[in-house]
Amino acid sequence: MTISHSKTLLVILQNAWGVNAEYYPAYEIDSFANSVTGRRLRMALPDNCKVVITNASMQIGDTADSVFPPDIEHVRAAINHCKPSVILACGVVAQQAIHQIEPNVPVISMWHPAHRCFSKMMAEAVKCELEGLL
């Protein structure tokens, strides 16, 4: 059986840190796939869709606690480019961006996957909610 990936899930994270300027978050990149964020995020992602991941800010931090304000135009461009069926906003910075943009698609919010309050139970609940929307 072939799974149709006709619907797109846009995942918005915070910002990258400790990587080069050309970095972007994707499971094809080992540093993302093997990171705490990548491993934990995977638990919340359904299999029944295409997943596109972006950061709310393209600035690169020096440390894990680096936080930058959202780049609204970058997030808006990501939404316009991938035309998602659903958006998953991970963490406060991503949620701030979505609040300012108010896209015309369903938005699910959750803790950032690297946040200390993120749990397997939360990931499973988000995954079920996303599957119902996709």
Image (cartoon, helix red, strand yellow):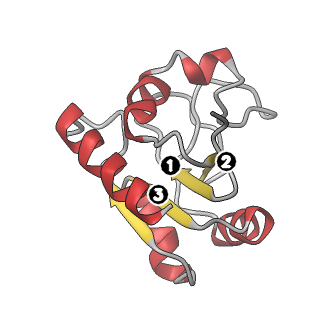
Q: Mark 1: which amino acid?
A: Gln
Q: Earlier in the sequence, mark 3 or mark 2?
A: 2
Res 33 quadrant in image: top right
Residue position marked by numbered label 1 in the rendering: 14
Q: Nearer the viewer, residue 39 or 20?
A: 39
Q: Are marks 3 and 2 in contact (CB under 8 Å)?
A: no
Q: Nearer the viewer, mark 3 or mark 1?
A: 3
Q: Earlier in the sequence, mark 1 or mark 2?
A: 2
Residue position marked by numbered label 3 in the rendering: 88
Mark 3 Cα-neighbour bin, 10 Å: few <14, some 14–19, many ≥20: many
List x then y, in percent, for residue 84: 64, 65
Q: Secondary structure at mark 1?
A: loop
Task: Name which residue lies at 37% across and 53% down.
Answer: 91
List x then y, in percent, for residue 64: 44, 29
Residue position marked by numbered label 2 in the rendering: 4
Res 8 quadrant in image: bottom right
Task: Name which residue lies at 42% across and 54% down.
Answer: 131
List x then y, in percent, for residue 49: 60, 49
Q: Are marks 3 and 1 in contact (CB under 8 Å)?
A: no
**Residue 53 visible in the current orientation:** no
The answer for how far apart the CA atoms under marks 3 and 2 are is: 20 Å
The answer for how far apart the CA atoms under marks 1 and 2 are is: 29 Å
Residue that lies at the very extreme toward the front in this rendered image = 1
Mark 2 Cα-neighbour bin, 10 Å: few <14, some 14–19, many ≥20: few
Q: Earlier in the sequence, mark 3 or mark 1?
A: 1
Task: Name which residue lies at 67% across and 33% down.
Answer: 26
Q: Is residue 63 above or below residue 61?
A: above
List x then y, in percent, for residue 62: 56, 29
The answer for how far apart the CA atoms under marks 3 and 1 are is: 12 Å
